[in-house]
């Protein structure tokens, strides 16, 4: 987003605004459609070339179409960037699902359709790539109807031309054929050759519209044979689309522009303005009951940062959706971020923050260009500069009345990657780079693992990881190397063992003398560490028993077998010796450590590994493959059940070692053909199998 183009479209009020997000998989033609729609309205706007990089963040363009101002958002198609898609859904008031006529509806689109359905967001479907060799509009329509549910009906059907290319669209409501073969749309009446198309698709469309009509007598009139006029049908159609109960399907060709005019008319006339779309939950920053706000330019300022990026020339850029009030460049705003309220791990760089700042320039976005504006009213999506402290998902409000928008549901970052700086200079630059990356991307979780000492980047998938690594290098000049992720283990006792710790040194002056006998025995899992003493006869003076206990805890924290902390043991002091002059606190601490190291061996101790409870949600047809894979990961199936409100899907619960989950985010996507998601929570610790214990003890790098 850089540079300046023509003037921003004039917004006359909230009712003249339409915000639409394009959702669909990579390769569906979604971004080409975005370019074509923008180019159809903005003269001279050249689309991106075929070699353009895949979208990884929200693209935005505000255009004037008829009497309304439309902001189109192009959301990434790669499932790794579903966080950006959800940000787009938060910013928009309607969604256009783009489906390729060659591939049908993918798993990610089906999941997002369900999310929109839950909140009642108006949706339409655009079927693209109609000219592809293996394109099948009818099969793709049936696929959408099967996976997206009721209310899916086409408004038009593509009509192949003489050379097989789609140059015409049969308009099912008007009974016309729209021809785009000459570069502009021409309309002609449908001929006998089109009768099969209309007979096949029109009755279901008419009946679908009538079922959603508020006129109860309309169905009776239709069944009695009355030919319903276009105005009546269109009125009920537009109302049903706005209510989110009817979802029209539009055939669209980005090559010829076929269907683009119908899409723009649908956006203008059917998709709701911001005043008709429910707003997210808003609360005072300090907590308290929800604050009721509406899309009123005169109301309290409530806006949310839905995307953040940095530009080499303009600097920090924030894509902001204004929900209530009016955002002005000459007035300070309160920036508030509290991702911790979501109750999920956020990692470093996402600490709670509240600050009053003065925004920079406000502009309408035009896919890379900024069109200056003096203000942004409720419902608008704009770019704001110089909000340096604002992170994606932060709330902007009035300093006099600080408010907080509940963030959208963030995807879980479940693919870990450990990184190490290539040089000392890179290590010095890493913290600042990580802060900037975290501010832009709430889906990225950065952790310094205290158990392993590693820096771990938790991402949503391989494409997300590649993007983060690329930005570290290209934007921040930080070179890092990816290293194997280590899982923090623990040590414990197999049975009862004892040893004598003798620390005696004499080198002139006061010496060091301390002797203690310790017994270590296992405790039930989850007990932690216990210390006891059964010394009799004053063999160890009372003032040194605390020293021995301190030495025990210090040594157990360092580990005895492989450098991992020891847990679930009881250490008992049974005997010892002291010297009236040479014994000291430090001497007995040292002797305790010696005794513990003496009693530790692979015969007396073993390793514990962390176990997670994993909940996998997957299409029923892939449940068997997922269960088999869990078994190969040393997992134990706990149970399975139908997924709530998701017919044809199941939830599988299993206990799986963390060592076996390092690549599960990638494997599950392949196993379930993109239909699987999973959640993991720490369950506890269990003994590591003997063969793996030997591997870990035989590889110093694992426990160095």
Image (spheres, rainbow, N blue to C red):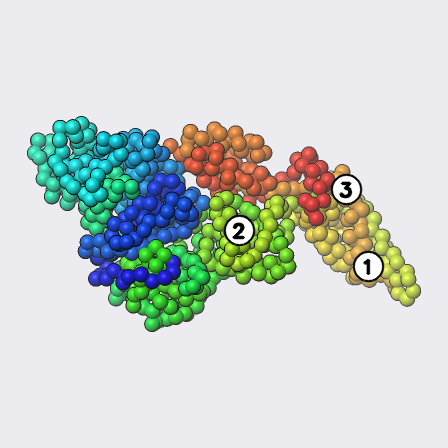
The residue labelled by disc 2 is 469
Q: Could you say whether the residue bearing mark 3 is in a helix, strand or loop?
A: loop
Mark 1: secondary structure = helix
Q: Please count the marks in the image.
A: 3
Residue 275 seen in render:
no
Of residues 413 and 616, which is closer to you in this image? Answer: 413
Q: Nearer the viewer, residue 179 or 196?
A: 179
Tell me which label, 2 or 3, sits earlier in the chain.
Answer: 2
In this view of the protein, which residue sits in the foreground, 5 or 543? 5
Q: Is residue 211 above or below residue 39?
A: above
Q: Residue at the location (46% across, 54% down)?
A: 441
- Residue 545 position, x and y percent, is 77, 57
Instruction: Identify the mark at residue 587; answer none if there is no mark.
Output: 1
Q: Examine the rendered structure and indicate whether residue 289 appears above or below residue 211.
A: below
**Residue 60 to residue 145: above or below:** below
The label shown at residue 601 is 3
Instruction: Please provide percent x and percent y for residue 527.
Output: 64, 46
Residue 198 visible: yes
Kindly report which numbered mark, 1 or 3, lies closer to the viewer in this rendering.
3
Label 2: few (<14), some (14–19) or many (≥20) C-alpha neighbours in 10 Å: some
Asked if the residue at tag 1 contacts the one at tag 2, i.e. Cβ–Cβ closer than 8 Å, the answer is no
């Amino acid at each position: 987003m850089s540079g300046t183009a023509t003037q921003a479209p004039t917004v006359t009020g909230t009712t003249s605004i339409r915000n639409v997000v394009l959702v669909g998989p990579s390769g569906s033609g979604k971004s080409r459609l975005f370019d074509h729609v923008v180019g159809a309205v903005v003269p001279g706007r050249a689309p991106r070339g075929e070699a353009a990089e895949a979208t990884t963040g929200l693209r935005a363009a505000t255009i004037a179409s008829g009497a309304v101002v439309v902001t189109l958002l192009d959301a990434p198609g790669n499932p790794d960037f579903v966080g950006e898609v959800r940000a787009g859904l938060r910013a928009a008031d309607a969604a256009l699902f783009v489906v390729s006529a060659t591939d049908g509806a993918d798993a990610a689109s089906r999941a997002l359709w369900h999310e929109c359905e839950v909140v009642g967001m108006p949706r339409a479907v655009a079927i693209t790539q109609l000219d592809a060799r293996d394109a099948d509009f009818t099969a793709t329509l049936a696929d959408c109807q099967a996976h997206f549910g009721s209310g899916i009906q086409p408004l038009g059907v593509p009509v192949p031309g003489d050379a097989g290319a789609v140059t015409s669209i049969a308009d099912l409501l008007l009974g016309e054929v729209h021809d785009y073969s000459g570069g502009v749309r021409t309309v002609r009446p449908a001929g006998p050759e089109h009768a099969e198309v209309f007979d096949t698709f029109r009755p279901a469309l008419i009946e679908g519209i009538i079922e959603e009509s508020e006129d109860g007598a309309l169905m009776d009139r239709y069944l009695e044979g009355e030919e319903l006029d276009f105005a009546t049908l269109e009125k009920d159609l537009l109302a049903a689309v706005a209510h989110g109960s009817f979802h029209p399907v539009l055939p669209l060709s980005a090559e010829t522009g076929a269907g683009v005019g119908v899409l723009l008319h649908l956006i203008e006339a059917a998709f709701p303005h911001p005043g008709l779309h429910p707003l997210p939950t808003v609360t005072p920053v300090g907590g308290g009951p929800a604050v009721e706000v509406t899309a009123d330019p005169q109301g309290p300022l409530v806006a949310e940062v839905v995307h953040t990026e940095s530009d080499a020339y303009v600097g920090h850029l924030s894509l902001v959706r204004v929900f209530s009030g009016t955002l002005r460049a000459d007035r300070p705003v309160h920036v508030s971020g509290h991702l911790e309220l979501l109750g999920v791990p956020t990692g470093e760089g996402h600490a709670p923050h509240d600050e009053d700042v003065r925004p920079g320039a406000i502009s309408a976005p035009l896919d890379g260009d900024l069109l200056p504006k003096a203000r942004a009213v409720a419902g608008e999506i704009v770019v704001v500069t110089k909000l340096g402290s604002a992170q994606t998902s932060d709330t902007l409000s009035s300093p006099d009345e600080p408010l907080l928008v509940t963030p959208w549901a963030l995807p879980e970052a479940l693919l870990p990657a450990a990184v190490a700086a290539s040089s000392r200079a890179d290590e010095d630059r890493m913290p600042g780079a990580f802060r900037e990356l975290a501010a832009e991307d709430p889906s990225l979780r950065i952790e310094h693992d205290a158990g392993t000492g590693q820096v771990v980047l938790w991402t949503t998938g391989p494409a997300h990881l590649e993007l983060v690594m690329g930005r570290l290098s290209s934007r921040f000049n930080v070179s890092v190397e990816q290293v194997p992720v280590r899982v923090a283990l623990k040590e414990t006792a197999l049975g009862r063992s004892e040893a004598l710790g003798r620390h005696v040194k004499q080198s002139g002056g006061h010496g060091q003398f301390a002797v203690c006998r310790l017994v270590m025995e296992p405790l039930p899992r989850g007990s932690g560490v216990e210390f006891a003493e059964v010394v009799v006869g004053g063999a160890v003076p009372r003032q040194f028993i605390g020293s021995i206990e301190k030495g025990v805890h210090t040594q157990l924290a360092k580990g005895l077998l492989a450098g991992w902390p020891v847990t679930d043991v009881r250490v008992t002091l049974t005997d010892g010796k002291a010297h009236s002059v040479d014994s000291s606190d430090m001497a007995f601490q040292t002797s305790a450590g010696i005794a513990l190291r003496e009693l530790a061996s692979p015969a007396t101790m073993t390793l514990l590994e962390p176990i997670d409870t994993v909940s996998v949600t997957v299409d029923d047809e892939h449940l068997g493959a997922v269960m088999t894979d869990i078994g190969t990961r040393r997992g134990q199936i706990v149970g399975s059940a139908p997924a709530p409100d998701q017919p044809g899907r199941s939830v599988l619960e299993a206990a799986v070692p963390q060592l076996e989950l390092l690549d599960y985010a990638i494997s599950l996507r392949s196993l379930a053909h993109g239909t699987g998601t999973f959640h993991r929570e720490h369950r506890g610790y269990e003994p590591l199998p003997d063969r793996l214990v030997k591997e870990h003890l035989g590889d110093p790098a694992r426990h160095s």
